[in-house]
């Protein structure tokens, strides 16, 4: 069984999400520095959430949801789910998607475009 929880912005967790990213996108993965930079420049007040999925102490997936700061549509949200290939088709992505969707349903404005 796996556990979904909020991302903890430690070096170890950044390295772990990078490892998932690299396994899924070997030629075009964001680096640890890319993730940290994106987090550092994010504007306060813009909704952003990153979740991680663990199984047996191993980070096997991560997901993020945000209200893009450049959008003029207040109901527009963006999200992505990245799962290690060996854990695909086991309900991991679906479970994270549902958790993100539940979170977005509590947001104002409510989502109109994903």
Image (tube, helix red, strand yellow):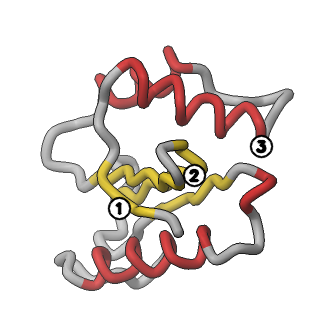
Q: Name which residue lies at 20% across and 81% down.
A: 106
Callout 3 secondary element: helix
Residue 43: x and y in percent read 22, 36
What is the number of the mark on residue 72? 1
Residue 37: x and y in percent read 40, 20
Q: Earlier in the sequence, mark 2 or mark 1?
A: 2
Residue 78: x and y in percent read 47, 62
User: Is the residue under label 3 in contact with that under label 2 (CB below 8 Å)?
Assistant: no
Q: What residue is disc 3 on?
A: 24
Nearer the observer: mark 3 or 1; the answer is 3
Q: How many marks?
A: 3
For label 2, count other residues whose C-alpha is less than 10 Å away and answer few (under 14), some (14-19) or many (20+): many
Q: Name which residue lies at 48% across and 70% down.
A: 96
Q: Earlier in the sequence, mark 3 or mark 1?
A: 3
* Residue placed most toward the observer, 23 or 56: 56
Q: Name which residue lies at 56% across and 58% down.
A: 80
Distance (Cα) linking label 2 and label 3: 10 Å
Picture layout, residue 3 above or below residue 43? below
Q: Name which residue lies at 41% across and 84% down.
A: 112
Q: Relative to residue 60, is residue 10 drawn left or right?
A: left
Q: Earlier in the sequence, mark 2 or mark 3?
A: 3
Nearer the observer: mark 2 or 3; the answer is 2
Q: What residue is disc 2 on?
A: 61
For label 1, count other residues whose C-alpha is less than 10 Å away and answer few (under 14), some (14-19) or many (20+): few
Distance (Cα) linking label 3 and label 1: 31 Å
Distance (Cα) linking label 2 and label 1: 30 Å
């Amino acid at each position: 069984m796996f556990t979904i929880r909020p991302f903890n912005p430690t070096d170890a967790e950044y390295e772990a999400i990078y490892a998932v990213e690299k396994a899924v996108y070997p030629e075009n993965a964001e680096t640890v520095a890319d993730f940290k930079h994106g987090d550092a420049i994010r504007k306060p007040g813009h909704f952003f959430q990153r979740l991680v999925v663990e199984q047996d102490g191993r980070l096997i997936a991560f997901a993020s949801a945000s209200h893009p700061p450049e959008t003029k549509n207040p109901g527009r949200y963006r999200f992505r789910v990245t799962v290690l290939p060996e854990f695909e088709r086991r309900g991991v992505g679906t479970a994270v998607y549902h958790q993100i969707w539940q979170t977005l349903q509590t947001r104002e404005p409510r989502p109109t475009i994903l």
